[in-house]
Image (spheres, grey):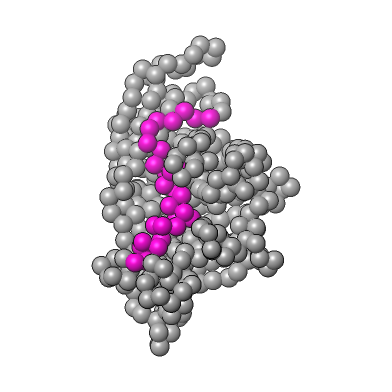
Amino acid sequence: MKRSNYLFLLIAVSAGLILSSCKSPIDLTEPMTQNSSTTQSFMQVAENSSTVSSFTPNYNEGQAMALAGMLAKDVYPIKVGQKMTLTDKSLTLVKDSTTATGTYIQHYNGELIIEGTFQKPTMGIGTKVDTTLHKTFTTTITRLIQFEKVASTGNDTLDWKVKAVSLPNGGTGGGNIAITKLTLTSQDGTNLSITDPNAYFFKAGKEKQGDSDAEDDDNHSLIANTFGEMHGWKDLLTWYHGNQPVTLTVEVLSSSADPDFLTVTYGAGMNGSFRTKQKFDLVSTTQEGQFYRKVYSKTWTTDSHAVRMHAVINAFPRNVVYDTDTPVEVMTWGVPYRVK
């Protein structure tokens, strides 16, 4: 058995053991697929949650976007964006009488739009777009969603609400690039590191009138759960006041020694307005066998107006954006983000 297959099998078995160890012999059902009526009800609860749906406005950019800030002089792309169309979705649910956890998977058809120039930009002269590339691809985004029972009407869409959701994690696959770590640094130097987006949960808090809001509770310490740690919004406010600088540091493993193409899209309201996109700067490169471990960084300022979330990081191998013939390969992580 190949080493990669062995590792995949080991991870799958470990995940299965974690889930099975939490089962109750009395009231916990077997996982239910998207074909069951119960799961359809929970899917509706999830998609009515602004915590869940706020990912889309920053993920589906709709068109090529100008990159905020100065670009390096050797960057030929001028605008880069992606148009995402949801083609399929599923929710696999494990529940008991008062709590439930769903694995929410979305499949997208994507179109990468690159507006740029074949001429090397000349300093002091405005660079004009002389070509537009359209590259199609398919990708998958996975999140874990925790639900809690809040009523007993007999209607699942009324009786259950989203309690917490993990960060989005996904991509096209391909093996040429992988995000391995994300670090957020606040003004006072405090760091928050994430190595597995699907193991990082944040509380949904108050989404509609009548909801209780965990961020208003006095006790807002980290809460352990089956898959990782749950963070209340109050734990994030050191990073997410309006007009505050946030530094993102991203580690990737890449098959190429050349700088990759990493961007962060953030600030979008639920209708897609106020969306901004920036390119990460390469900080360091260290060769590890046949791969290169690279560190990228970007400091950006949160919006002055309140937005729910998300920020979305997309990591492309360099040739995807710079070479007309290279097919799209991308890895995507979400960033816990809210301005209050």
Which residue is the extreme one toward the top?
125
Q: Give how far across and how far down residue 212 sits, in percent.
A: 57, 65
Q: Is residue 299 visible?
A: no
Counting labels gives 0
Q: Is residue 96 above or below residue 255?
A: below
**Position of the N terminus by quadrant:** bottom left
Q: Position of residue 85 (x, y in %)?
A: 31, 44
Is residue 197 or residue 143 the one in the foreground? 143
Q: Mark yes or no: residue 114 visible.
A: yes
- Residue at 49 percent across and 13 percent down: it is 126
Q: Is residue 205 magenta?
A: no
Q: Magenta stretch?
A: 41-68
Along the line of sight, the residue nearer the viewer: 235 or 264: 235
Q: Is residue 287 left or right of residue 102?
A: right
* Quarter assignment of residue 159: bottom left
Q: Nearer the viewer, residue 28 or 205?
A: 205
Side of 115 relative to 300 (left or right)? left
Could you tell me which residue is drawn at 50 percent across and 52 percent down? 180
> Which residue is at a point 36% across and 61% down the rendered structure image?
44
Residue 245, image x, y percentages: 66, 40
- Give coordinates of residue 154: x percent, y percent: 37, 76
**Residue drawn at (38%, 71%) of the image:** 156
Left or right: 3 as drawn, with respect to 35: right
Q: Residue furthest right?
A: 188
Query: Residue lying furthest bottom in this view?
Result: 26
Q: In the figure, 324 relative to 306: above or below?
A: above
